[in-house]
Image: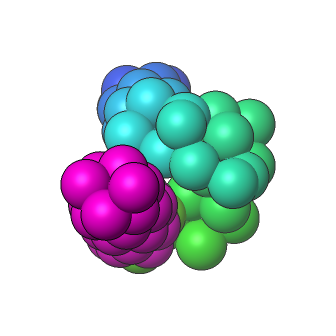
Amino acid sequence: MWLLFIVAYIILCVLCGLVGKNTRFGFIGWFLISLIATPVIGCLLASIAYFRKRKRANKARQKALNKHKQA
C-alpha cells in the first residue's frame, strides 16, 4: 500500500517537472520543489511560471513587431 502511494507521489512530481521544464528552474527544479512541498503546489507554481514566461515572450514579440512596423 505504501509503495503504491510513493510511486504515485513520484509520478505526480515528474508531471510537475514536465509542466515547468521550459521555465527558469527547469525540470529538475520543479521536480524537487514538488517533491519537497507537494505535487499540487509544485504544479500550481510551475503553471504560473510557465504562463508568466509565455506572457513575457508575447510582449517581446509584439514589441519587436511594432518596432519593425515603425521602421
The relative height of residue 6 versus residue 46 in the rendered view (above or below) is above
Residue at the spot 57% in from the left edge and 49% down from the top edge: 23
- Decide if residue 35 is in sight here: no
Q: Which of 35 and 47 is in front in this view?
A: 47
Q: Where is residue 9 in the image (x, y as percent from the top left)?
A: 44, 41
Q: Which of 3 and 23 is in front in this view?
A: 23
Residue at the spot 53% in from the left edge and 37% down from the top edge: 22
Where the C terminus falls, by quadrant?
bottom left
Q: Position of residue 25 (x, y in %)?
A: 72, 52
The secondary structure making up most of the magenta span is: helix
Quadrant housing residue 58: bottom left
Asked whether, in this view, residue 46 is left or right of residue 25, the answer is left
Asked whether, in this view, residue 33 is left or right of residue 69, the answer is right
- Decide if residue 36 is in sight here: yes
Q: Which of 24 and 34 is in front in this view?
A: 24
Q: Position of residue 40 (x, y in %)?
A: 33, 66
The relative height of residue 49 versus residue 22 in the rendered view (above or below) is below
Q: Position of residue 38 (x, y in %)?
A: 49, 66
Quadrant housing residue 19: top left
Asked whether, in this view, residue 6 is left or right of residue 66, the answer is right
* Outermost residue to the front: 71
49 inside magenta stretch: yes
Q: Give the range drawn in magenta.
A: 44-71
38 inside magenta stretch: no
The relative height of residue 71 versus residue 5 in the rendered view (above or below) is below
| Number of marks drawn | 0
Where the N terminus falls, by quadrant?
top left
Asked whether, in this view, residue 20 is left or right of residue 28, the answer is left
Residue at the spot 59% in from the left edge and 72% down from the top edge: 37
